[in-house]
Every structure is written in structure tokens, then in C-alpha cells.
């Protein structure tokens, strides 16, 4: 039936009375997305409901594009209005550029004149240098001949010097031997002196012991003399009473004990004297030996003195020969000094020429530097906007913005080593921003620009800068230096502004290192190379083959 055009889904093949009434009671359009009205019913019948969703999307897209178009149109109108307002400034800037172009042309002509004069002076000095170089070569040949002659003289002198050194060494050796003999002689004399002192001490001790021996002998003699007397007394009293005999026996015994004591004391003194006598014999033998050694040393000393006298005579003859050699050497030295003087004069002349050449080169470099400075000044004058120049002029003493708190252009408030100049110029896009102390000061500057129709400028109010952000410790890849740490501010107060301009940008020696630091350490880093290539945090890279600003 569908193939025959009969619609069984909507019953279009047959409409009953009730369905006609229902259709007539339908609203023109459904109130909600799921509600069905006459429009939805008819679209369902004719099959156009499948395009409702696409139609709604197209309508939304048309509305969005209409809004975007209106926004772009408004921006175009604003830009055209701003362009019309800047027409006068454009004409003034073109006039300024024409004047600057004329100035550069005049400076270029002046530079060409100076360069031509310098080249002429340089050619004259080069001719003088060539002539003096020829003279210097001639003097060097003469100097070489003189050096050869000096070497011949020195070779002959070296043989004589070797003989003299040999004789001098023998003399020194003889003197050392004589000095050792003298030291040995002094040592032996001291030993003899010591032995004589010991001898005197032993002789005194021997005399003392002899006196003691004589006293002991006299005491023994006296005791022996007393014994006969006692014996006579004993014999005379033999007939005495028994009591007297007993007393006599007692006295005899007492006398006998005293005599034994004296004899024992005599034997003890004799035994004490025996080692002394033996020691005296040993010392006498040592004294005889020392006297023999002294005699031998005196003989050796006399022989050494004779050798010394002969060596001194030989030394005197060598001195006379040395004097002759010295006279000859003095003559050759005079010739050498004369040759050296000629060489010195030639070298001084060469130095003068070199200094003249350096002076000309320095003058040429100064001219080139002046030309480069003129170019840079012209370039900076063109690059610095009219607004920035107007603000800086108005901030001078006695001008309208004197007390606003303008510190200056950010690029003029800090310095950096010359090797990083290209890097900071590339990485810091805020060098022309004007640093002010307060937001109120920045607003006054904006009012000044509007008042005098100077255009647009960017300002950095220090009171709105984040405090302490630049003081945080940052761990960089492989200890890479930060561009911020290489900048030296003229005033510590502008440090937050400098950090705002460069952030944690790293400085790499080449592009390969910069690429490794930027991508290979867990997080992205902003890296600039010394020659001006820049890798942003987004991963984009800037650089190229043209001359770097």
C-alpha cells in the first residue's frame, strides 16, 4: 500500500469525522518541543520535519555570525576613526623621516670623505712601513751575524770556563779537606784539654789517697810502738796479784783488739788505693795515645798546608789567565752591546711604525663606531614613538608631568652586559614601556596623551606590581642562568617591573641548548639565545636569518 501512495502512518487514505474535528482544534504551532500543533502535523505529513534540527542549527549559526560581523564592523569603524585622527601625526612623522633620511645621507657622505682620507693616510703609512721593514730585515741580518760571532766567542769561553771551574772545584775540595782537618785538630785539642783536666783531677785524688795512706801507716806504726811497751809492762807486772793478772789480761786483750782494728783499717785503705793506682795507669796510657795522635795530626796538617799553598799558587795563575779571558770577553761584549743598540734602534723604529699603524686603525675604528652610533641613534629615534618622547619630555624639571612620579623608559632604567644585549632586546617586549610609581600617575600620563593628541603609550605602575615574585628561588634546567638575574637595575624599586618584562626567561648559548631546556625538563620554559632566537612557553619559536634588532 505504501508503494501505491497510501499513507498508513497518518491515515491519509481516510479521514473520519472525529479526526477532522481534532485537526481543526489543533493550535497553529506546538508550545513546546514535544507538543504537536498544526504546523508539526503538516510537516510530519509532508516529511519536512526531518529538516527542523538543521534549520535550527543554521539559524543559531547565522545569529552568531551576525554578532561577530557587527563586532568586526564596529572595530573597523573605530580603527578608521583612529586612523583619521592619526593622519596629522603620520604626515609629521613622514616629514621627520625625510629629514632624518637627509641627515643620514649627509652623514654617509661625511663618512665616505673620512674613509677616503683614512685610506690615503693608511696607504702612505703602509709604504713607510714597508721601507722600514726592509731596513729592519737588514738590521736583523747584521744582528744574526753578530749573534753567530758571539756564539763562537761563547763556545771558546765555555772551554776556558770549564777548565776554570775544574780548578776551582779542586781548590774548593782542598779547602774543605783543610777545614775538616782543622775541625779534627780542634776536636783533638779539646779532647787533650779534657784528658789533662782529668789527669789533674786524678793526680789530686792520688795525692789525697797517699796522704790518707801515710796517716794510716803512721797510726799503725804508733800502734806497733805501743805494743812492746805494753808487753814490758805486762812482764813487769807478772808477779802481781791474780787480780792484777786478770786486769792485765783484760788490758792485753783490749790492746790486742785495738791493734787488729788498726791493721784491718790499713788493709782496707790499701785495697781502696789499688783501683786508683790501676785507673792512673790506664789514664797514663790514654794520654800517651792522645799525644801520638796529636803528633800524627800535626804532620797531616803540615802536609795539608803545603798542598794549600801549591793550590793557591795554581789558583793565582788561573786568575791571571781568567783576567785575560775576561778582557777578551769584555771586548766581545762591547761589540755585542753595539749590535744590540743597533737592533734596539731598529725595533724602536718598528714600534713607532706599529704605533702609527695602530693609531690609524684606531682612528678608522672610531670613525666606523661614530657611523654605527649615528645609525643606531637614527634607528632608535625612529623606533621610539612620539608618545614616549612626549611623556619623557613632559617629565623634566619645570614641565607639566614633573611631580607625577615618572621614573623613565624601562629600557633606560637598567643595564646588561654587551653580549646579552641582543637577547634582552628580543625577549623583553616592554623596553619602551614607561615606569611610573603610582596608578594615579599613569592616569595623569594618559590624560596628558589625550590632551595633546600624542597617540598611545604603555605604562607600568609599580604600586600594582606583585611583591616578592622576583625574589623566589627558581630551579632552572641544568642551572641555566635567568635573563632577569643578568640585568642590573639602576634603582632597586624597578625590579618588579623588570621581572614583569622578562619573567623566568632563560639565556642559552645556542639554539640546540635552548631547545633542550625549553622542552625536555617536565615543564615548558621560555628560552632566548644570545644571538636572538626565542622559544615561547606555548612552544612557538622566533628567529631567522636577517639582521637582529
Image (cartoon, rainbow, N blue to C red):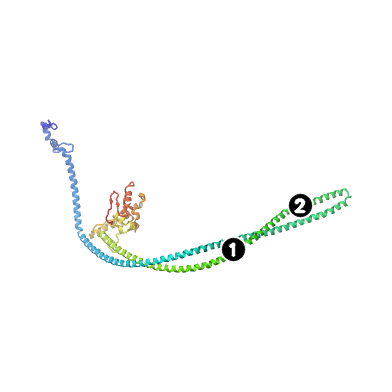
Q: Secondary structure at mark 1?
A: helix
One can see residue 181 in this view: yes
Against 352, is 19 above or below? above
Nearest-to-viewer mark from 1 and 2: 1
Q: Residue 285: x, y in percent? A: 69, 56
Q: Position of residue 288 (x, y in %)?
A: 68, 58
From the viewer's side, name the closer residue of 35 and 317.
317
Q: Residue at x 19, y 48 (%)?
A: 68
Left or right placement of residue 337 versus residue 289 in this view: left
What is the quadrant of the C terminus in the image? Answer: bottom left
* Pointer 1 residue: 307
Of the numbered discs 1 and 2, the one sitting upstream in the chain is: 2
Name the image quarter holding residue 217: bottom right
In contact (CB < 8 Å): disc 1 and disc 2:
no
Q: Residue at x 48, y 68 (%)?
A: 328
Residue 394 seen: no
For the image shown, how many numbered marks are present on the structure? Answer: 2
Residue farthest to the top, as pictured: 1
What is the x, y in percent for residue 225? Answer: 82, 55
- Disc 2 target residue: 267
Report the front residue among 67 and 175: 175
The answer to which image quadrant residue 9 occupies is: top left
* Distance (Cα) linking label 1 and label 2: 61 Å
Which type of secondary structure does the marked residue at label 2 adopt? helix
* Position in image of residue 448 (x %, y %): 25, 59
Amino acid at each position: 500500500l505504501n508503494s501505491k501512495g497510501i499513507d498508513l502512518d497518518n491515515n491519509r487514505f481516510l479521514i473520519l469525522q472525529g479526526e477532522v474535528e481534532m485537526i481543526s482544534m489543533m493550535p497553529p504551532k506546538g508550545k513546546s518541543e514535544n507538543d504537536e500543533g498544526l504546523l508539526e502535523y503538516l510537516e510530519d505529513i509532508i516529511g519536512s520535519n526531518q529538516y527542523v534540527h538543521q534549520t535550527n542549527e543554521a539559524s543559531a549559526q547565522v545569529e552568531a555570525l551576525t554578532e561577530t560581523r557587527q563586532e568586526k564592523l564596529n572595530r573597523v569603524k573605530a580603527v578608521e576613526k583612529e586612523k583619521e585622527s592619526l593622519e596629522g601625526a603620520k604626515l609629521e612623522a613622514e616629514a621627520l623621516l625625510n629629514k632624518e633620511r637627509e641627515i643620514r645621507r649627509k652623514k654617509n657622505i661625511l663618512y665616505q670623505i673620512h674613509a677616503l682620507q683614512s685610506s690615503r693616510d693608511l696607504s702612505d703609512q703602509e709604504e713607510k712601513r714597508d721601507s722600514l721593514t726592509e731596513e729592519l730585515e737588514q738590521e736583523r741580518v747584521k744582528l744574526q751575524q753578530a749573534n753567530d760571532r758571539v756564539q763562537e766567542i761563547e763556545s771558546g769561553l765555555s772551554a776556558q770556563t770549564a777548565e776554570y771551574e775544574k780548578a776551582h772545584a779542586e781548590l774548593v775540595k782542598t779547602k774543605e779537606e783543610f777545614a775538616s782537618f782543622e775541625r779534627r785538630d780542634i776536636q783533638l785539642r779539646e779532647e787533650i784539654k779534657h784528658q789533662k783536666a782529668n789527669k789533674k783531677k786524678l793526680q789530686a785524688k792520688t795525692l789525697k789517697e797517699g796522704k790518707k795512706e801515710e796517716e794510716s801507716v803512721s797510726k799503725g806504726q804508733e800502734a806497733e810502738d805501743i805494743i812492746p811497751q805494753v808487753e814490758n809492762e805486762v812482764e813487769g807486772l807478772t808477779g802481781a796479784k791474780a787480780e792484777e793478772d786478770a786486769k792485765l789480761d783484760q788490758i792485753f786483750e783490749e790492746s790486742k783488739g785495738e791493734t787488729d782494728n788498726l791493721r784491718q783499717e790499713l788493709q782496707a785503705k790499701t785495697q781502696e788505693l789499688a783501683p786508683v793506682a790501676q785507673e792512673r795507669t790506664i789514664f797514663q796510657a790514654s794520654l800517651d795515645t792522645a799525644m801520638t795522635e796529636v803528633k800524627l795530626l800535626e804532620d797531616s796538617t803540615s802536609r795539608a798546608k803545603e798542598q794549600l799553598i801549591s793550590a793557591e799558587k795554581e789558583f793565582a795563575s788561573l786568575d791571571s789567565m781568567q783576567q785575560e779571558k775576561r778582557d777578551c770577553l769584555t771586548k766581545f761584549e762591547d761589540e755585542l752591546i753595539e749590535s744590540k743598540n743597533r737592533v734596539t734602534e731598529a725595533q724602536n723604529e718598528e714600534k713607532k711604525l706599529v704605533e702609527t699603524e695602530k693609531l690609524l686603525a684606531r682612528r678608522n675604528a672610531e670613525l666606523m663606531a661614530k657611523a654605527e652610533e649615528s645609525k643606531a641613534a637614527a634607528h632608535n629615534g625612529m623606533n621610539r614613538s612620539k608618545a614616549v618622547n612626549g611623556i619623557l619630555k613632559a617629565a623634566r624639571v619645570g614641565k607639566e608631568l614633573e611631580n607625577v612620579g615618572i621614573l623613565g623608559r624601562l629600557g633606560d632604567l637598567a643595564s646588561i652586559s654587551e653580549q646579552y644585549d641582543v637577547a634582552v632586546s628580543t625577549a623583553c617586549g616592554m623596553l619602551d614601556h614607561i615606569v611610573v610609581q603610582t596608578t594615579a600617575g599613569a592616569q595623569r600620563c594618559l590624560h596628558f596623551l589625550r590632551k595633546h593628541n600624542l597617540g598611545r603609550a604603555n605604562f607600568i605602575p609599580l604600586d600594582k606590581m606583585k611583591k616578592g615574585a622576583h625574589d623566589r628561588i627558581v630551579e632552572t634546567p641544568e642551572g641555566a642562568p635567568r635573563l632577569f638575574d643578568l640585568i642590573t637595575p639602576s634603582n632597586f624599586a624597578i625590579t618588579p617591573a623588570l621581572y614583569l618584562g622578562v619573567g623566568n626567561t632563560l639565556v642559552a648559548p645556542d639554539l640546540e641548548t635552548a631547545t633542550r631546556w625549553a622542552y625536555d625538563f617536565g615543564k615548558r620554559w621560555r628560552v632566548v639565545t644570545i644571538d636572538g632566537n626565542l622559544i615561547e612557553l606555548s612552544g612557538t619559536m622566533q628567529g631567522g636569518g636577517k639582521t637582529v634588532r
